Structures are given as structure tokens and as C-alpha cells.
Amino acid sequence: MSLIIKGMAPLLQVFDMPTSIRFYRDVLGFEVVSDAGGGDDTDWCLLRRDEVEVMLNTMYEKPDRPPAPDPTRAAAHGDTTLFIGSPDPEGAWRHLVDHGVLAEPPVAQGYGMTQVYLKDPDGYAICFQWPTDS
């Protein structure tokens, strides 16, 4: 019997759920397909765009949420990157910039990928990438 895998949805801990949902939904075009209730102020949600899924979960229960993110905890997000296939990295970059996102211009890497890097509101890195035309 073989192992069958049909997808993957990373779970990201976020500080401000409404801000994160607006980023993933309104800027990146994901749709909220399931949540724990409460609209944008939910404690958990599953977002999907085409075949890509990501789950967001609040770092703190509402009564325990500090007024600002813990910089040490947020710094740890720097070792997590979501790589998303995007056949038009230049177009992805223009879309991001048009939506006020600070994103690095596309770079053709020596290993054959053209990549656009940015950070989400919680400091998780996102890379839109596609094989570089030869």
C-alpha cells in the first residue's frame, strides 16, 4: 500500500487575525473557506486559492493578547517561507506593489527560478516563484 498525499496546508500563528485575513484574502486573493466563527475576528481559518491552502490561528486567546507582538516570537517567523508557484513573477510583483506591499523585484536565481520575496503582516516570508525561461 502506498502513501497518498493530496495537498498540504501550513498553519501560521498570527498576532492580528483581521489584518492577516485582509492580507491573504484582499491582497493575495485567497478565499476564507472555513473558520471558527466571528468573521475576520475569528481565532482560526482555512484559506484557499486554486490548489494552495493556508491556515491561520491566533497566537493568543483574545483576553490574553498583549497590546503589541512579542518581537522575539515574531523574529522566529523569519525561518519560515511559503513558496508559491506563480507563472508570472513580474506580474505578481506589480500586483503586490500596486496593493502597497513592500516586495523585492523579481530576481532570476542561478538555480533556475525567478523569485519575488515579501513578508506577510506577521513576518512570515512568502516567495512567488517560477522556473526561469532558458
Image (spheres, grey):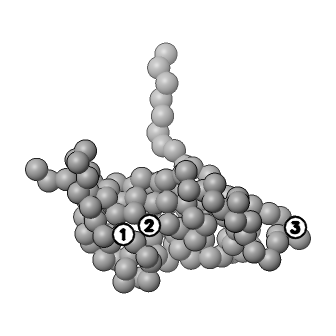
Asked if residue 31 can be seen in this view, the reply is no
Please state which amino acid type lies under the numbered disc 1: Glu
Residue that carries the numbered disc 3 in the rendered image: 64
Residue ID for mark 1: 104
Query: Which-is-in-front pick, marks 2 and 3?
Result: 2
Across and down, in percent, residue 83 comes to: 42, 53
Q: Secondary structure under badge 1? A: loop
Q: Disc 2, disc 3: CB below 8 Å?
A: no
Q: Along the line of sight, which residue is nearer the eye, 120 or 86?
A: 120
Number of marks in the rendered image: 3
What residue sits 44% from the left and 83% below the top?
Answer: 100
Q: Would you call the spot at circle 2 few (<14 residues within 10 Å), some (14-19), or many (20 or more)? A: some
Q: Earlier in the sequence, mark 2 or mark 1?
A: 1
Is residue 92 at all visible to an observer of this figure?
A: yes
Amino acid type, mark 3: Asp
- Residue under numbered circle 2: 118
Residue at far left of view: 134
